[in-house]
Image: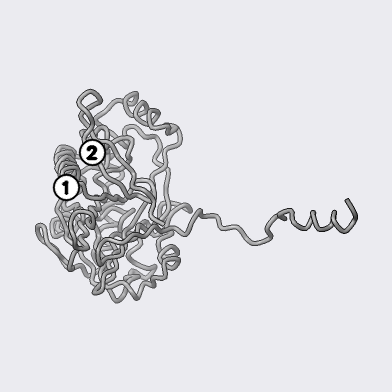
Amino acid sequence: MGTANVVLARSRVAQPSTAPRRATQGAGFYELTLGDARVAVVSDGWFPFNPPHPTLAANATRDEVEGALDAAFIDPADVRVQVNCLLVRTPRDTVLIDTGTGGAFGATNGKLAENLANLGVRPADVTAVIITHLHGDHMLGLLNGEGKPNFANAEHLVHKDEHDFWAADTHDFSHSRLPMDMLPGFIAGAKKVIAGAGFTLVEGEKEVRPGVTVIPSPGHTAGHVAIQIDGGGGAKNVLLYMSDTVHHPAIQFPHPDWAVMFDANPDLAVASRRKLFDRAAADRVRLSGAHIPFPSIGHIRKQAAAVGKGYDWVPAMWEW
């Protein structure tokens, strides 16, 4: 091979890129079309959830919890919980469901604003914000450092039962397994967001925007809700956002009776979870949730009797 040919051959070999590499894989969102709605799961990041017992299942044994994680190929010593929010764009509205941690849970979260920008959405574009419940990883991204709403043009909505529980002077945690020393932080955070948000209160099951319906699903908190998105045209264009009905797919799908330590009323949370699971499985609608691994879109089906009494999570095919 002549010198010129050697130089040409070398020029065809791919050289290492000098472009800066992003630390985040992908752009932090996953969008799909549901009828006349564009729905995007938008990641706020993740945080560690260790130890997984009793946090993920206070009414199961450590061996049971670690066994369920191991069966799902998850190291029980390194459990990570993802944080997702949902953006719904229709011809009429831009609705944001939950606002993430605001970075309060460490450097690996608080990415909502960045990932909304990747989607081409500015805070000023959002016309409504629905908070599914007033736990920090769902609402601390709502306010800025001055205690003012980050989404200044939006109506802010929360269920009345949720608002009234946290706004009260006393709080009933008699059924909860949450350590008592953690309660003041939960209460203070909720009261701060209530003071700054100027919430519109929702009662019962209600369509709060065309095609966006709040569905009470209490137990995790007093006024925890799921959100149904219906873009029109039947079940294929319906998505049920379950928020904290599921904290980890290896735990609550196969074992829906296992209650997380953070449940205010574990028995009621289990009943609400089974009700939502039955509804979603029967209607064959798509599901998403705050802590289901990204891109957090799929279906559930009841397990065969020979397998168990839980549900299988079936991730949806990726839509390019």
Residue 283 got which mark? 1
Instruction: Give the residue displayed 37% in from the left and 51% down from the top.
Output: 83
Disc 2 element: strand
Nearest the camera: 20 or 320?
320
Image-based side of 202 in relation to 229, left or right: left
The C terminus lies in quadrant: bottom left
Q: Is residue 196 visible?
A: no
Q: Residue 208 occupies which quadrant of the picture?
A: bottom left
The residue lying furthest to the front in this view is: 1
Q: Residue 309 occupies which quadrant of the picture?
A: top left
Kindly identify which residue carries mark 2. 301
Image-based side of 235 in relation to 126, left or right: left
Nearest the camera: 16 or 218?
16
> Disc 1 marks which amino acid?
Asp
The residue lying furthest to the left in this view is: 204
* 282 relative to 109, above or below: above
Q: What crowding class fits label 2: few (fewer than 14 Cα within 10 Å), some (14-19), or many (20 or more)? A: some
